Amino acid sequence: MAEYVPLELPENPRLAQNIIHFARALRRAGLPIGPGRVIDAIRAVEAAGFTERMDFFWTLHACFVNRPEHRVIFAQVFRLYWRDPRYLEHMMSFMLPAIRGVQEEKSAASGEKRAAQALLDDNLPNVPENEQSEEGTEIEIKSTLTMSTEEKLRTLDFEQMSTAEVAEAKRMLARLTLPVKPIPSRRGKASVLGKQADFRRTLMKSMRHGGEIRSIARKTPRPRWPNLVVLCDISGSMSQYSRMVLHFLHAVANEKGAGWAKVHAFTFGTRLTNITRHLATRDVDAALKAAGAEAQDWEGGTRIGQCLHAFNRDWSRRVMGQGAVVLLITDGLDRDAAGALEKEMERLHLSSRRLIWLNPLLRWDGFAPKAAGIRAMLPHVDSFRAGHSIQSLEELAAAISRPDDPGEKTRLMAMI
């Protein structure tokens, strides 16, 4: 265990204080930084010293970064905190909500928006560059209502959230999991308590004794996990919900030990786009930026029947084998004919082990299946659920483990 000599600091150590605040910003941006690393960083700067900005950068980089996906976030937070003299205006330009249908003149680089959110956090003290008098403004942070705020955020509609609430909701979605129970397969594995006789292993063991069978080997079904196939609507009416759902799917795709064999993700509006390889990127900002660049029909029209036809024709046999579970996220408002949509939904339902439809329109108490697209799709799903809040996504995790849970399908089918 490392032993440190006493570190002599001045009475008002501004550099050490700034390093502490810098570490807090990195922690809010997603880097796993504890008090030990902060102490190591202060002592490393004191021991190594620096005459150029790059020396200071790499000293802190060595103390705070230990994963490749954290390099971009560290570089963006470092640039905004230590280098850019107009960092506040720069960050505010990324935090202001953009008008729908109008693209920003300059898009945020990977990790830049997360760095801005971390540095603009109200809990982060503002450290002045110049010396101030001892009589300063005391900042008191109250965390007594934190739990009630999270409970309120869980039930809040994604479309009604402010910029700060969206940032907090994304952090909550990153902690969600989507576990699934294993599926018994025809292949077996050796087990003393197995109920099936393993004749192959029995004969192989008998060869060691001249063909004499002394005991019967047993086996039990080997568990296997299904694939998760997600079809997410990114049309204009679904854009805000799609962004939050994709954050959730990124966390599911990168969660180790969640049970899924593989997560396949597709977006559709006027055409189908495969974004599976983009969700495999560990950094969520880089993953969603690449997915948005790949899907050129973001916030466009909706052709559900045509896109489902492309999926059934080109991708169904590749990703739907071995009992895949399908999540369909859309509001069901389609431009195409209902007959073609119903045919493609029936084919998708027959190809999947279970088809779950998440519709944000279910947030309304008076929702009824009046649209032609919804009436064509509803009979061919196993479960019909809401998908407009964090709580609805939490309930989805419980519904996947219950194959007999139809959600709101039974009630709405009675209205057709």
Image (cartoon, rainbow, N blue to C red):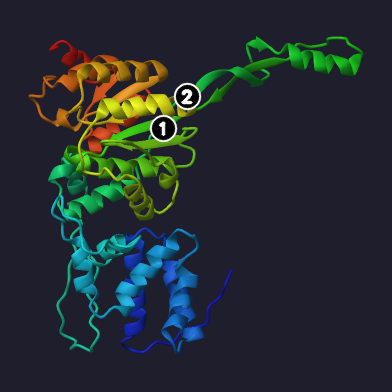
**Residue drawn at (15%, 48%), measured in percent from left and top?**
161
Give the percent coordinates (x, y) of residue 67: 49, 60
Q: Please, which residue is most extreme toward the left here?
A: 366
Q: Would residue 120 appear left or right of 259 to someone viewing this image?
A: left
Viewer-proximal residue, 292 or 30? 292
**Residue drawn at (19%, 44%), measured in percent from left and top?**
153
Which kind of residue does numbered mark 2 sit on? Arg
Q: Would residue 394 appear left or right of 185 to someone viewing this image?
A: left
The quarter of the image holding the C terminus is top left
Q: Which of the numbered marks, if any, corresponds to residue 317?
A: 2
Viewer-proximal residue, 50 or 376? 376
**Residue drawn at (37%, 51%), measured in percent from left and top?**
290
Tag 1's secondary structure?
loop
Viewer-proximal residue, 327 or 40? 327
Q: Which of the numbered marks, if any, corresponds to residue 261?
A: none
Few, some or many residues within 10 Å of mark 1 (<14, 14–19, 20+):
some
Residue labelled with disc 1: 179
Which kind of residue does numbered mark 1 sit on? Pro
